[in-house]
Amino acid sequence: MASTVFSETLQSITTTKLTELSKKRSIFEEHKASLLLSAQSEADQKKRLAVLVDGVKKCFAIKIAPRKRGDRRGGARRIAYGSTSDPKLEVLLKNLERFLDQAKYDPSISSKLLQDWEDALVKKLNVQSLKYQYATLYGELVTEWLGAEKASSLPDNISETSEGFEKLKPAARDESRIGWEKLVFEPFETDQMAIAEYLRALFGETGDNKQGFKALKQLHKEVEAFEATLSAPNQFDETVLRWTISGLIASVLLSDEKRGALKDFLNSPVILAEIADVLNMRIADISEWSWDDEVLIEQRRQVTGSYRIYIDEELLQAIFLQYVGVKWCIFFKEAFVNFSNFDGAWTSLRPPIPLEDRKRREYFLGAQMKKCSVQAKRQSVYKSIFFMSQLQDSTYEENCAQEGEEEANYEHAAKRQKSSAASVPQMQKMQQIQMQQQQQAQAVVQQQMQQQQGQSRGGQDYQMQLMVLEQQNKKRLKMARQEQDSMAMQQPHGFNMIPYNGVPHSGPHRNHRSDEYDIDTTNRPNTPMATKQFLLHLLSTEVLVNTRLHGDFTCSRSEFQSFSPSLPHSTITSVLSFFGLSDKWLGFFRKFLEAPLKFAADDADVAPRPRKRGVPGSHALSTICGEAILFCLDYAVNQHTNGAQLYRMHDDFWIWSSSHETVVKGWDAITSFADTMGVTLNRGKTGTVRITKEQKPFDIDPSLPVGEIRWGFLVMDPASGRFVIDQDMVDTHILELQRQLAEKDKSVFSWIQAWNTYAGTFFKSNFGTAANCFGREHVDMMLSTMTRIQRQIFSDSNVVEYLKKTLHERFGIADIPDGFLYFPTSLGGLELQNPFIGLVQVRNALFEQPASVFDDFFEAEASAYRRAKAAFHNGQVNRNGTIEPTYRPADCRTFMSMEEYQRHREEFYTGYEGDLLSVYQDLLQKPGPEDVDVSEEEENMLDWLSAIDKQDDGYLKWVALLYGPDMMERFGGLKIVEKGLLPMGMVTLFRSGRVKWQG
């Protein structure tokens, strides 16, 4: 949450404004009571209305325009323009003054019309009383909230890291610390010779992967050139510091108080200049860099129930490490992308197509294009979204997660090993056994790789033959590429001796050249949770496509146990050294890894201990350490499977294919990697499914991991391949939500913030976001589960009735409108989130039965086949640009069969309406929310609302139309609290802080 200084300032401002509000309210109510009494005593209706008009001016302190010099018209003076915050009231009073002048003489002005005017003025008075009442209530809620925050015993000066230590039993906070300390402070030495041998074999230094070895040497040159840029003088200036500090502010690395200090830095060019001078000296002497004498840490509970370690980092140190880390991240992102694009180094996802098949297809159908096909889409998705996704593309890239967007931890006593403290001794024992068996494992790996490379060489002979034929039509392109590659060998792309401090012109994919696929970086998910949700959609789409077209689909997934805190330092330095880092920078990384850590709760005489294992989370430098190692995993799977793609988000990875054997080979590569690098699989998040078209059980290779395919609250039905919500797991978290809400009951704001984060974001995220591949049934399942959550927590009531009852009991206000609870803070509402609205918005836009799209596809494909057959017989096939234009098959007069036409439908562009690519993309699609219809009058009311609807998903518009009529009737508009009455901006900022979950 916010710092103590900030909360005290907000408390002082709120108290001052509440005092002022009380005075204004008291004066208004006195004037109002006096006015209504005077009006009631006036029997003449016209005079009574005149009394009300004058009295309302006094109640609202409306100014009268001064008489201009030379104005000899006499008579009553008019209301000054803009003298009130309510333009409608100003217009009403001005018009009533004129209408009353008419009523003095015009007998046709009816008493009914006069009564309507009188009622309108009285309503304005009552609305203002209500606004004062709710402004006072809001201020009291702020005071209540700040008091509850002050009473909290948790300190707030420690910043966060994201060391993913697994969830423990609720009473095991102390055990969590013990387990974490055993991991972090006890070294685990891996066999660096075995790692070096593994890497040399993988990257072709000791095998037949010649192109991989060439790409590795290119990488070494790029590392050398990049290190030279980090030795240049005067790297820090105001521009560099601005993007570095902005990145820190957007991250979760620092506390709110320190983020506030950084914002102050940005407002002072003088301070930035001084910081630049200091950091330029520091980077010029990088060999002498070190941590301070001690770095304080503290553990805190997360919404998932896990405990994480929070680190308090000195600001200059944080800025310096952020800069160095981001520079290395951007470099390695481009370097690894360049490696994957190096000719022949990375095996293509596409299986070899027999040359005869290709020539026959081109003879009957014309030139075939690999782009704009399903395979091209798969390749593009992998390279643009998943490949090295943890590394930044540019200095200004921000990847912020909303609080509550965390994956729920699955606990199963019968299946899952005890995590953290309980699992540390067992994990270390397992790893010791793994290292003892290293030589045997390496021999097996090398033998398998040799067999694999032999198979690959057989495929390469065909590929060479195909390449020669294709390049007959591409000589000029080949010469141009050779020239560019020659230049690249002399000077790596994007790295000059002058330090580069801006944003890359085209990102790491700017050197991408492929006749198989294009890179699309415009529609990438912008948060880690969005990427995970897309992966679930991708997996569900692949299940549908492969079971329907190939009849078989296998998926295995896992993650590494406590990856960040358990990563062996010897593994990190071995991999970085293999990729060409110099001794100077290896020394820097060693010092970074061995931070002197001390828990803030320890006594002063407790000495800090150097870290011996793992990396500090949320650091860009830590990301490099993990991703450099995991890049080797990506490449190992690619090589061992002849092109399969490992869909990985940091240490969470999935592999799938219509070929069961491919997944078996991929899993073998994963386990070999884990054995060599000294990391352990998390058995609680490891599993395999094999799904068939007939939904009958098929044998699963015993080498594949046993377990369910799970993510969040979702578990995949092994028969149908559909994700369903694990209701037993939801029940566990409902009980935890009840406990957390009870802990927050001292403050309505704290209660709502916990509800929004847990019941809204956390539950909804872990149910999976709606998409066509999930279908309407999935949304119905989410809606019914959300309903059950509320019923279980509130029995026969609901969240709205609970809050209304609470507000009535504490503050004595009855008949609270629903809109007050749901309207945003900027309008004076409590900003309670309604998770049902977003789901209802998209429900009817989703596919009712996702699998039914294939019925339409098969009809479209049959029609396309008939058209192609007719075109062939009519001599309309264009064979320009084919591999061999003069080729004629033996059955050249008989058009290809339907089976042959379908054989490679995932490989080539077809282009007909309803083709397989469009089906694939439609299944991945997340339909936009269906908007509510509005009248012209309502549209005018909502025009200004778009300015505060940052999500642009129609949520606020829905809320405004659902509750707006009642709010308009009560408050005369959508705004509940007038601007200036309370520090609403500071309240909004304060509420943006993190929730303190109780352990």
Image (cartoon, helix red, strand yellow):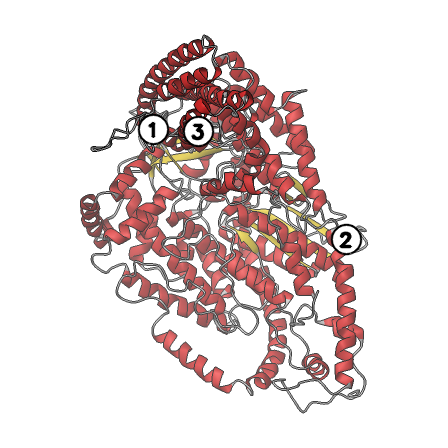
Give the residue at mark 2. Answer: 699
Distance Cα–Cα, label 2 vs label 1: 86 Å
Residue 220, above or below 791: below
Is 838 left, or right, of 901 in this rendering? left
Distance Cα–Cα, label 2 vs label 3: 80 Å
Q: Where residue 80 appears, x then y in whole percent? A: 32, 30
The picture quadrant where one finds residue 984 is top left
Q: Where residue 959 appears, x then y in whole percent? A: 56, 35
Q: Return the disc, 1 or 3, that comes first in the chain's sequence.
A: 1
**Residue type, mark 2 in image:** Asp
Which residue occupies 72% across, 43% down? Answer: 777
Residue 376, above or below 956: below
Residue 78, above or below 229: above
Which residue occupies 25% across, 28% down? Answer: 66
Q: Where residue 250 appears, x then y in whole percent? A: 38, 43
Is 448 left, or right, of 998 in this rendering? right
- Can residue 851 be spotted in the picture? yes
Crowdedness near tag 3: few (<14), some (14–19) or many (≥20) residues, C-alpha within 10 Å: some
Instruction: Choose mark 2 or mark 1, whichever is in front.
Output: 1
Q: Return the disc, 2 or 1, that comes first in the chain's sequence.
A: 1
Marker disc for residue 92: 3
